[in-house]
Image (cartoon, rainbow, N blue to C red):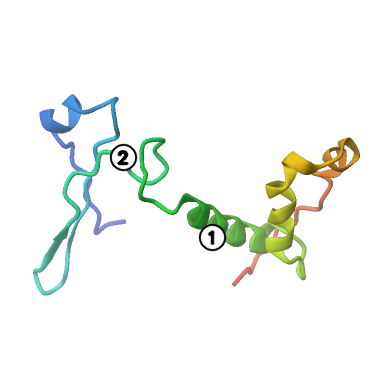
Amino acid sequence: MAKIAFEHGGPEYDAKYPDGIPTSVAIKATDGSVYDSGMVMYPAGHARNTTADLHGILKEKFNMLGRITLPRGTIVSEFVAKFESIDSMTPEQLLDLYNFEIVEYKNYA
């Protein structure tokens, strides 16, 4: 965190909010090279972003969180698949949807 600096984007960024969430990231490498994203109006997760693989991002997020909160041996993709098929569940299946154990692992590597 000590290597990260946050800066206000200025009037150009302010003028584009709340239409989007104007954001940019610049990374300076140890050799002095700078990698700059330029202004991004609709970052991943914004309703108007049409380029991010939201399904892939959420799948990875669910996998990471599932590995640290579900009992060992749980196949996270099968667990998540239940929630992805909610539209075809019976009332009985819906009642049981959130019936699962959440555990806390100190070492989840």
Q: Residues within 10 Å of mark 2 (few under 14, many from 20)?
A: some
Between the C-alphas of marks 1 and 2, the distance is 21 Å
As drawn, the residue found furthest toward the left would be 32
Q: Which mark is residue 108?
A: none
Q: Which mark is residue 60?
A: 1
Please say if 98 is above or below 59. above
Q: Position of residue 24 (x, y in %)?
A: 21, 46
| Screen quadrant of the C terminus | bottom right
Which residue is labeled 2 in the image? 42
Under mark 1, the amino acid is Glu
Q: Position of residue 106 (x, y in %)?
A: 65, 64
Q: Which element carries disc 1, helix, strand or loop?
A: helix
Q: Position of residue 108 (x, y in %)?
A: 63, 68
Kindly identify the residue that appears in the image at 72 percent across and 47 percent down.
85
Foreground pick, 47 / 23: 47
Q: Position of residue 89 (x, y in %)?
A: 81, 42
Drawn side of residue 60 relative to residue 35, left or right: right
Kindly identify the residue that appears in the image at 77 percent across and 63 percent down.
71
Q: Are marks 1 and 2 in contact (CB under 8 Å)?
A: no
As drawn, the residue found furthest toward the front would be 88
Q: Residues within 10 Å of mark 1 (few under 14, many from 20)?
A: few
| Screen quadrant of the N terminus | bottom left
Please say if 41 is above or below 81. above
Q: Quadrant of the rendered structure where residue 42 is? A: top left
Foreground pick, 36 / 104: 36
Q: Which element carries disc 2, helix, strand or loop?
A: loop
Under mark 2, the amino acid is Tyr
Foreground pick, 4 / 97: 97
Kindly identify the residue that appears in the image at 73 percent across and 61 percent down.
78
